[in-house]
Structure formats: structure tokens, C-alpha cells
Amino acid sequence: MTPAERIGLYQRFYAVVKRIPKGRVATYGQIASLAGLPRSARQVGYALRALRDASVPWHRVINASGEISRRADAEFVHIQRRLLEAEGVSFDETGSVPLERFRWQPRTGG
């Protein structure tokens, strides 16, 4: 993949992430599917790690188990949790977000 293709791919993911409403979460796989690239969840993670645009609510993306994915810098896990809690997202006793309650369900075409 060329750098230009990678940038284009990442922009597709960022456009989907920007649609996640406050107080909702989406999974990496969900973002990939909504961007038209199913089975590209890992690429979504790479895109978010490369993110430099503060207008993209990266903190609303979690893994398929409802957990915040671990990072090399553990502080980001705490930051992400605080940002989600500030939006009203709660965590269960295992530290997971109840997806049945907080998962974003976009309308078709919206």
C-alpha cells in the first residue's frame, strides 16, 4: 500500500469515527465494516494510532469484547476510560463497556 493509499484508507475510517455520537461506542470491526472494509479491524487500530486530528473522537472506539485495547503507553487506557465516563458511558465490574447498551447503531445511510 502506498502512503497515499494508506492516507485515503485512514480518512475513510476517521469519517466513520466522527459519526459516533457522544455517549456511544463502536468496535474496531464495526468501523471497518461501516467504512466498506470488513475484516480490517486491525487497520482501524493502526489508523487511530496514527491520528493527529483532535476532531476525531478516537476514544469512542473499543474492541469487540467491549474493552479498551491495551497500548504501549498504559496512560492512554486511563485517558480513554475517563473520556468515555465523562460522556456517560459506564463500565461493568470487569472493566468492559456493556455493548448491548452503549454500542452505536447507525441508521442506514446516516
Image (cartoon, rainbow, N blue to C red):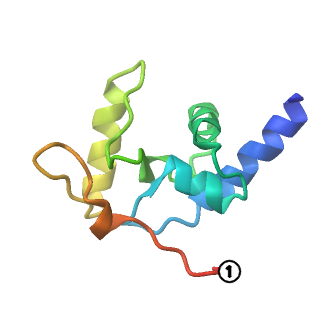
Local packing at callout 1 (Cα closer than 10 Å; few below 14, some 14-19, many 20+) is few
Q: Residue furthest top?
A: 72
Of the pair 73 and 109, the residue shown nearer to us:
109
- Image point (41%, 25%), residue name: 71
Quarter of the rendering containing residue 39: top right
Element under disc 1: loop
Residue under the image location 47 percent in, 73 percent down: 105
**Identity, as a three-letter code, of the amino acid under mark 1:** Gly
Residue 97 position by quadrant: bottom left
Task: Establish if 12 lies above or below 71.
Answer: below
- Foreground residue, 82 or 13? 13
Q: What residue is shown at x 39% (from left), y 35% (from top)? A: 69
Percent coordinates x, y for residue 101 in the rendering? 28, 69
Where 55 sits versus 22, above or below? above
Q: Quadrant of the N terminus?
A: top right
Q: Residue at x 89, y 36 (%)?
A: 4
| Whole-percent x, y for residue 85 in the image | 25, 55
Side of 14 relative to 28 (left or right): right
**Image label count:** 1
Left or right of 84? Residue 90 is left
- 3 left or right, relative to 14: right
- Give the x, y percent position of residue 9: 77, 45
The residue tagged 1 is 109
> Quick one: 108 or 47, which is closer to the camera?
108
Residue 20: percent from left, percent from top: 51, 65
Which residue occupies the extreme left position in the image? Answer: 93
Quarter of the C terminus within the rendering: bottom right
Decide: is 80 above or below 92. above
